[in-house]
Amino acid sequence: MPASMPRTMFDKMWDAHFVARRLDGREMIYVDRHVLHDLHAPHAFEKLESTGRAVRRPDLTCSMQDHTVATKPGRDETTNPDGAQFQRAMREGSRRNGIRLFDLDDPEQGISHVVAPELGLVLPGATHAVPDSHACTVGGLGALGLGCGTSELEHILVTQTIALKRPKNLRIALTGQLGPYVGAKDVALRILALHGTSFGRGNAIEYAGPVASDLSIEARMTLCNLTIEMGARSGFIAPDEKTYAYLAGLPYVPRGAEWEAALAQWSLVPGDPDAVFDTELSVDCTGLGPQITWGTDQAQTISVDEAVPSLGVAEARSKTERALAYMGLEPGQPVLGVKVDRVFIGSCTNARLSDLRAAAALIRGKSVAPGLVALVVPGSTSVKRAAESEGLDRIFKDAGFLWGESGCSMCAGGNGDRGLPMERIVSTTNRNFEGRQGKAVRTHLASPEVAAASAIAGFIADPRRI
C-alpha cells in the first residue's frame, strides 16, 4: 500500500512489522515481544532441543506459569499433580534457553494476558504473540496481539517472525452510553448476540466510537479479549491519553527521553481519519442491560432480564434444541431466578483489579447463598497483592467466597478447578462450550457484577436489583 494513501491503524501496525511475503501468500511479520505459557511451550522447547535450534531473541521472550498451576492458598508444584510435568518442563526449557520465567513464587506471576500489560511488556503499535487464542487481549493498549499454535510457536522462537495471511479491516463503532452495572463484557456479548461467532473471520477488528473511548484501559482489554470469539484474528482500540497514563512508570516501559520519543511514536499509531475499512458495523449501546449467555456458544446471549428465545427458524432449530437440552432450559423461560450451584470470578477476561472492585462493591456486607460454591481468582499476583491492600479479599472471604492464588483456574479447568456434572455456573470467563468447565457442566458467561449478584442470590440475578 503506497505510503501516501490513508491507512487504518491495523495497516500501520502490519506494515511497520512486515518482513517478507512467502510463496504461499502468507506474510512474515516481526514479533516485538513473545510470551509463552506452560501448556504449549514445553512441546516447542522439546522440538527445538531435538533439532538443535536456539531461541533467536530470548531477551524479547518471557515464560509464564498460568494454565496448569493450582490456585489453592499455599500451592506448590505438587498441588495440581497433573500440571507438575508441564511446570517442570517450562522451568527447564526457559532456563536452557535463557528466557525470563515468571514461576510460581515470582511476585509478578499470573495469567500471561494480564501480566504483560500491567508490566508494560506490551506497548502501543507493537506486535505481541502468545501461544493462546486470547492474545488479542492486549489490543486494549493499542497493540496487535497474535495468537499462535504449537508449530507457529516454534517458528516464532527460532525466527522472531510469524507467517500469516493478511487480515482485512473491520471497524465496529460503539455508539451511545453505558448505564449502571453495564460494562465491556456486556458490550462484547451483545456484539456476539447480534453478529454471531464467525462474522469477524479473516478480519482484524478496530473498536471505535464514544463507548470504546469511554472505557478504562482494563475494560478495553476485556472487550478485545473476546474478539477471538467473534472469529477475528485480532482486535484493538486506538491508544490515547488514557493509554499513556496507564503505561507511565511501568517496569518495562521506556523512561526519560525514551518515554518522550515513545509518546511521539505512539501518537502515529491511530488510523488516518479518512482511512477506508473493508467492513464497518455500528452497535448502539443505548439501553443495553447486563448480558448473560443462555446456550453453549457466546452468540446465544440475552439481557439478564429477558427470556430464553424460541426455537426459531428450521436452520437454527437443531442447534437451539441441543443448547437448551444441554443447559436444562426451555424456550421462553426467564433466566432470572434460575438456580446457580457455583460462581467463578477470574480469567484473562475479568480478573483485573477493576473487576474485583466491581464485584466486591456488590458483595460487601452480604453472604454467599447457602450451598453455593463461589471462587475468586485474581488474574495476577500483582492484582492479588493490590486487592489485599484494599481489603477486597476480606470482603470476599467474609461473604463466603474462596480466595485463590493467581492463574487461569476454571476458565478451562487445566489446573483441576472444575465444576461437577450438571452443575450450573455463572462465570466471568470467555467460553461456555459443552464440557468447558467440567463434564456436563452448564456455564453462563457474564460480567463480574452479574456473577457477584448471582452468588449472593443463589440464582441468576440482575445486579441493578441488588
Image (cartoon, rainbow, N blue to C red):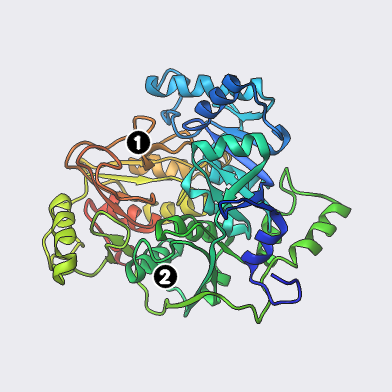
Residue lying at the far front in this picture: please name it.
23
Percent position of residue 146, x then y: 56, 50
Q: In the drawing, does residue 426 fall left or right of residue 267?
A: left
Badge 2 marks a residue whose secondary structure is loop
Answer with mark 2 or mark 1, whichever residue precedes in sequence. 2
- Could you say which quadrant of the image residue 437 lies in? top left
Looking at the rendered structure, the kind of residue marked 2 is Pro
For the point 67% across and 73% down, the residue is 7
The C terminus, quarter of image: bottom left
User: Callout 2 environment at 10 Å: few (<14), some (14 to 19), or many (20+)?
Assistant: few
Residue 283 at least partly seen = yes
Percent position of residue 359, x then y: 41, 53
Looking at the rendered structure, the kind of residue marked 1 is Gly
Of residue 101 and residue 292, the one placed in the foreground of this image is 101
For the point 33% across and 62% down, the residue is 463
Of residue 385 and residue 331, the one placed in the foreground of this image is 331
The N terminus, quarter of image: bottom right
Percent position of residue 387, x then y: 53, 44
Q: In this view, does 435 lie above or below 142?
A: above
Residue 181 at least partly seen = no
User: Which residue is tagged 1?
Assistant: 413
Of residue 372 and residue 169, the one placed in the foreground of this image is 169
Percent position of residue 205, x then y: 52, 65
Q: Are marks 2 and 1 in contact (CB under 8 Å)?
A: no
Q: In the drawing, does residue 258 fall left or right of residue 173?
A: right
User: Which residue is tagged 2?
Assistant: 180
